[in-house]
Amino acid sequence: MSEIVIRPPYLIFVGTETRPTYVKTGLGLVDWRPELCKGQLRLSDDAVDLGLPDLGLGEALGSGVNSLVIGTAAVGGGIPEEWVETLVMAAELGIDIVAGLHSSLDEVKDLRAAADRSGANLINVRKPPENLPVGTGKKRTGKRVLMVGTDCAVGKKYTALQLEKDMKKQGMNADFRASGQTGILIAGRGIPIDSVVSDFVAGAAEMLSPDNSADHWDVIEGQGGLFHPGYAPVTVGLLMGSQPDAFVVCHEAGRNIIEGWDEYQTPSIAEVIERTKVIGGLTNPDIECVGVSVNTSPLKPENRTTYLSELSAKLGLPCVDPLHTGAGPIVGKLQAISDADQKALRQVS
């Protein structure tokens, strides 16, 4: 998998973005790697506040910042013209620029020139490995659990990270596998699946979760959504190539419209389960849903428990908010799969 080296500590660049949904990269780093985040750089007072100190470039350099990490992930993944002056100034100071955008930092001539003069690094996280294979569909050893969503930005990455954490607490052999720019920044490795040419997405997913020991679980970060009018293709490729034994449906409570596509409603969780089984069953006929992860932040805290218990009763599956309740019930389902497989192996031997 592609390995990246980012020099901490970080200054998280928010720009003028006012929508938290499109600052998921910055929020992810603050939530999962707070010890690496020194401050934030906002170009307007109404930009999203990550809860970090506001630092100018001079202040950031004086406090030891080595990397400016672009914390936004807007539709299209481009570099707005209004950012360029600030990014160039940072590079002139010798601060590395790190981005998970579709556009390459090297394409900005003034930025490339500034980095060449100062020795700053321009690090493009959203760059897949070369010579990726076409998917084979062949069964691999080890086990895999994939996060799927009713929409984008509903908590797939957070669910996978918490699931890995809780699995390890229970002594399970598990590793988070990053498939997007924020996950790669958090994990330090991975493949940006949404930047892979469509013919090779399934092959890239196979590389992301290769053969492993029988008791090992790859906890795979999901991308897009099977019902998403723009991003369903990457979801299908990731699902086919990862060949998950299990999947977790991720949802945000109260979200009824696809974010940014107002004419499209979000599917029901039951619809996502059904479609995931049908598509995923091609490369793993034994695929099963082991639970639902809900971002309950739109709800009043006192309503969280009732919401999750009623949803669990309706679906017959464990339903959790991983950041508030942990993922223990889902871990239990995964452990049961592992135990059943081990029992079957002992009977054969």
Image (cartoon, helix red, strand yellow):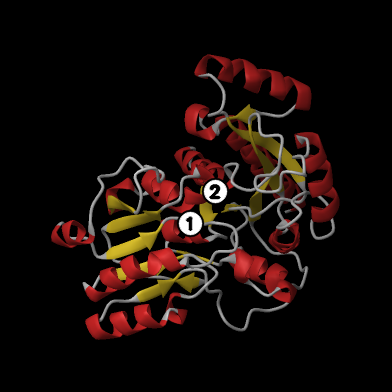
Foreground of the two, 271 or 100: 100
Residue pictured at 29% horizontal, 66% vertical:
7
Q: Is residue 345 above or below residue 257?
A: below
Q: Is residue 123 above or below residue 320?
A: below
Residue pictured at 56% horizontal, 30% vertical:
321
The three-letter amino acid code for the residue at tag 1 is Thr
Residue 303 in the image, given as x and y percentages of width and height: 58, 16
Q: Residues within 10 Å of mark 1 (few under 14, many from 20)?
A: many
**Residue hosting label 1:** 182
Secondary element at image label 1: helix
The three-letter amino acid code for the residue at tag 2 is Lys
Image-quadrant location for residue 114: bottom left
Image-quadrant location for residue 194: bottom right
Q: Residues within 10 Å of mark 2 (few under 14, many from 20)?
A: many
Secondary element at image label 2: helix
**Residue hosting label 2:** 157
The answer to whether 55 appears left or right of 163 in the picture is left
Residue 144 in the image, given as x and y percentages of width and height: 65, 53
Camera sees residue 6:
no
Camera sees residue 31:
yes
The answer to whether 284 appears left or right of 253 in the picture is right
**Answer yes or no: do the residues labelled 2 and 1 have beta carbons within 8 Å?**
yes
Foreground of the two, 108 or 180: 108
